[in-house]
Amino acid sequence: MTAKDKYSASEQGLGYLYQPQFALLRLFELPESTELLIEKDDDLDFVDQNGTKSLGSLKHKYEGDRVTDLSVDFWKSVRIWLSRYNRDKKQHSLLKFLLFTTADVSNTSFISAFSAGNLPRQEIDTEVVEQAMAALKSSSAKQFEGLSTSLESLNENELTDFFARITVIESSPRIGTIRAKIIDSHMRSVSRTFRDAIFDRLQGWWHDQMIRLLTGERDIPMSGYELSDQLSAFADEYKTDNLPIHFAGTTPNSDIDVDGDSRRFVVQLREIGLKSNRIRSAILDYYRAFSQRSIWARENVLLAGEIEQYEDRLVEEWSRYRDLVFDELEDGAASTALINAGKELYNWAEFESGSNGSLRIREKVYEPYVVRGGYHILANTGPTPRVYWHPTFFERLDTILVDDE
């Protein structure tokens, strides 16, 4: 084991990352009716359907650390819990106190009496309370100042009741093991092939919810029901009639340069006179569809040849509508008529093709950018695009692309 660096903040950093990870695991382990808050009365607050609130303190410690009589982690949590106990009318409160620590509790410490291994426990032996108070009074450490006095302000029954509410869960899962524990124990109904991919989706959603709770953007607790529903929703995306959607509403990391973009599909849109805002939307659809296909390939959710067959369907439907629109043009039609015909064909691809069930890559994939972006990908293929909008685009292809460059 590597020696500890007294100046290292690695465990503190891990502690911040550990909090949402552990919260996810714990909510899976508790009844679905449980509600969760983060950084309210403690690191984590768990509220059951009867209104009992369990305040959870989390301690991610160095490997090999032990909890002893004067462990700061324990007494710091006691200080927090005592303030909540007093606030909520002491013995009349619906509070329980939990210390989750990755460390082991020393067998010679009175704290071992609070170990979860000694549950069920309705009350605590008064001798343990006396040992706790004696240990606290024996210390002159600054961090314990005033705590002994605060505890002694409770009467004997209150003091025993307070300590009886404490449970220490030692050897709690370390951050590096949580992913595997969730996947192995709580995702058995999910196809083994896609468990890692679905966990990544779930974790991203979960961290977003934790941020919203911390910033106050979300003002209602998380619940086990919501967690189960979200897992089910992600799992449904990986079934044979569906595909996962990752890029709805997203934008590229770099700025969109409508005027300077020289890709074939953008050049084509300029040829039919589209305004900048619509070209920007097209670039977004292309980015989302292209990025989405990359994720599908990485997660191995597509069947062999599925993209190729899908593109063939897009091209066939496009060609049918192209023939309908272009057949109305007379020989030698004016440039304005050609541009209007191209716009009509493009308008169909942008606004109507998505409602055509035969153009969904799979039955339950409704996201518009999949179809719209699919057409832009086809319009961008080289050296010859598979779809186009302007009726004479092919006749002027080389000149158009050279001029634009």
Image: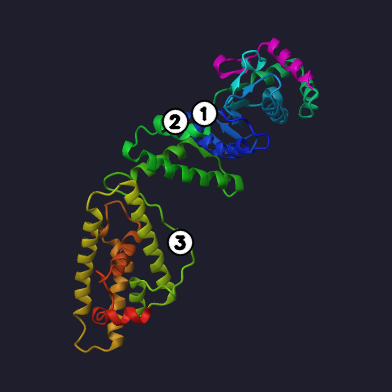
Residue drawn 22% across the image and 71% down it? 321
Residue 233 showing in the rendered view: no
Residue 12 drawn above or below residue 351: above
- Which residues make up the magenta segment? 113-139
Crowd tier of the residue under label 2, counting other residues whose Cα lies within 10 Å: few below 14, some 14–19, many 20 or above:
few
- Along the line of sight, the residue nearer the viewer: 125 or 182: 182
Q: Marks 2 and 1: in contact by CB < 8 Å?
A: yes
Instruction: Residue under label 3, please give it.
Output: 252
Instruction: Residue under label 1, please give it.
Output: 173
Q: Quadrant of the N terminus?
A: top right
Label tally: 3
Q: Position of residue 214 (x, y in %)?
A: 60, 45
SS at badge 2: helix
- The image's mark for residue 181 is 2
Left or right placement of residue 18 versus residue 350 in this view: right
Residue 24 drawn above or below residue 310: above
Kind of residue at badge 2: Lys
